[in-house]
Amino acid sequence: MFVNEVNDIKIYNLSAGKSVPEWLTDRRKRAQLKKKVDSRRQIELIQDFDMPGVCTSIRMSPDQQFILATGTYKPRLKCFEVRNLSIKFERCFDSEVTTFEVISDDYSKLIFLQCDRYLEIHSAAGRHYRVRIPRFGRDMKYHKPSCDLFIVGTTKEIYRLNLERGQFLQSYESEASTLNACDASTEHGLLVVGSKEGTVEAWDPRCRTRCAILDVAIKLPDAKAFPSISTLKFKNGLNMGVGTQSGHVLLYDIRSKEPLLIKDHLNKLPIKRLAFNDNHNAVYSLDDAMLKLWDESTGKQIAYIEACTTFNDFCTIPGTGLLFLAQEDVKMLTYYVPAMGMAPKWCSFLDNLTEEIESEVVEHVYDDYQFITQKELEELGLEHLIGSNLLKAYMHGYFIDLRLYNKAKAIVDPFAFERFRKEKVRQEIENERKPRLQLAGKLPNVNQELALKIIEEQSNPSSSKLRDNKQLPNLLEDNRFKVMFENSDYTIDKNAEEYKMLAPVLNRLEKSKLKEIKKRIEINRVAELQEEENEQHEEINNDEDLFGLDNDKDESESETASSDDEFNKEFTKEMKKVYKDVKKQKQQEQEEEELEEHLNGSEEQKNSDIKRRKELKMISLQSATEMNYIDRAMMKAPLQDRILKEEAKNAQIQLVGRSLGNRQMNFDMRKPLSKIMKKRVQQMKVHREERKKLIRPIKSLKLKKVNYK
């Protein structure tokens, strides 16, 4: 059981507890719940108080002994008995239930309005009768004095089904095109229906005539959505609440056309249901996002309950602070608000427990699992767990067991907790320690430059360009920004990229402020000199001094006007320079990261890098004669070998594939030759052609043998 405190009013969530992921088996779920110490302290007010999919509507029987709820999927009804705090029976339907009514004191007589235009009448044994209505229904209400069931829907007619006779009677015809909601008073029997056009019509079942029409939409001219009527609820014979599609609640006295109070939910969502608490003069109003509790006379908010998914319906137990909520989730929520009344008799132990429970807040999606992103997984070195049972993929990250996450984090950063503890102790000591000298203008330890600027603005409010010369709030004393000058985590990093890009703009503002400060300093200095001269020389006139001051001001203004153009040019230069510096710094960081990745590779790559470096050193240490000898040897080698060697040096190796297996390596020898090699190849071709020209005439000559004897 967890508690949330809003406006000094505690709201206890009786259905909250340790949540377990859905992908676990039932056996593992039970095993985990047994191991947890908190699960033993957890209060399960009603056993199996849930639905297989979604809960659509929920009601309490008039005798306050049975809780009835409908949901999906398969469409069904669940009945819970409060004496045993467990389920009594469960029934299934052929289609989903839009709404239902309890027309007896207990569960023995029920009527269900279904989404396929059918009405089902159930008895204690089960389904008693099933009848179809002409149009789709949206709401219905049972009128006890006449035994008539009024049904409204996508038509202007109000259907009447008499349950005593078992037949449809003549329908009421309204002026509206569509009717969304209806309600009947238990005191005088007046029937009210709400239309799509934003009107409320009142009908008297005794004479079967319309009594009056109330235009609600005209009272909400500023509503962004059209204020169609979404729900109606009588508090007593005279007071009534009206909920609209635009998110407004209007309280009316049926004797007047003017609303007593207009309450805006500020969510722009339609009001789904209203309820009244007569003992504490409070109103409950529900929309998709939250349930609000507010004062009926003033409209001031008392408390609220926020939705984790979407709220569909709720019901209260009259005279108590217990309420049930149906939502777009498996669980049906149970809340207890002691300020709205005591607990019912069947769970009176809640009053004693709530006094001993301390406030707890749980914000995790799953209590024993931690959500981490891909980047965090790489930082922890747990990439090899992807695809295993230890990681569960979810959206843009993974769920990991909290114990494994804590162990991995402790290995990566073992001194994180010690640093956190030392910082916490240091902050507490500094807060407790009082300075020996109490200085009025003492600067904080964090962001001193920013604090100086704020102090300067506070001391000179005329420099700030505000409308009507409004006084600036002191940011150093504001609790919202107080942490910025106390916690070292909020220090301004001047080496950050964002700050460097903003630096020219900030410098421009600072320069403009400096000019104003210099003006003030000059004016103050001249004023001091005037006072000294007046004391020493009483003969000097004050008018001349003031005239000199005016000249100084004019000169300073002319100087500032002439320097604006130069200042703008300097500003553009500074912006370009900063942008280039940031770009260079990014490139350097990328190169450093690539080097680190290369150096942090496998041992074979490291050894190969070391060998390459040694070879480069050996080549650099060789003398020029050795290099010449190598060139001569290369020139003696045939042209084919030389080209192949040069191509082998310039060869490319491409790796294609993933990091885990299925790799492919391409060795490309046919890379375009360099300019030097092209020149050498051309020279060799010319040389070979010259040799051919010389050899051919020599072979054509026939030399005669000569005997020298």
Image: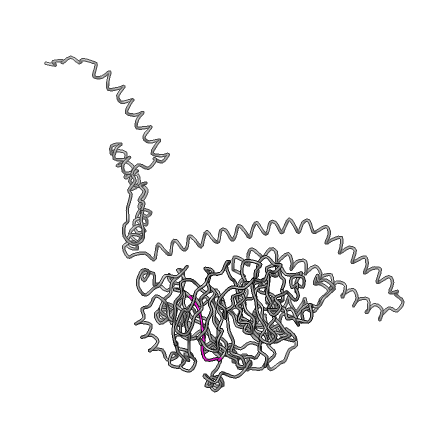
Return the residue nearer the eye: 470 or 369.
369
Q: Is residue 703 above or below residue 74?
A: above
In the image, is 415 to the left or to the right of 101?
Answer: left
In the rendered image of this protein, does residue 675 appear above or below residue 37? above
Q: Main secondary structure of the magenta part?
A: strand
Q: Position of residue 410 (x, y in %)?
A: 37, 71
Where on the picture, by quarter, is residue 390?
bottom left
Residue 301 against residue 629 in the figure, above or below: below
Q: Residue furthest front?
A: 165
The residue sitting at the left extreme is: 709
In the rendered structure, does residue 68 fall within the stretch colored magenta? Answer: yes
Quadrant (top left, top right, bottom left, bottom right) of the N terminus? bottom left
**Residue 414 seen:** no
Position of residue 29 in the picture relative to residue 568 (left or right) = left
Figure quadrant of residue 33:
bottom left
159 vs 627, left or right, is: right
Q: Which residues are magenta?
A: 63-71
Inspect the magenta stretch and tell me whether residue 166 lies in it: no
In the rendered image, the vertical position of residue 457 relative to residue 636, given as above or below: below
Residue 565: percent from left, percent from top = 68, 49
In-front residue for pair 301/570 = 301
Q: Residue furthest bottom?
A: 352
How many numbered markers are drawn? 0
Question: Could you say where residue 87 lies in the image, as x and y percent from the top left?
Answer: 39, 76
Q: Quadrant of the C terminus?
A: top left
**Residue 161 versus residue 56: which sits nearer the camera?**
161
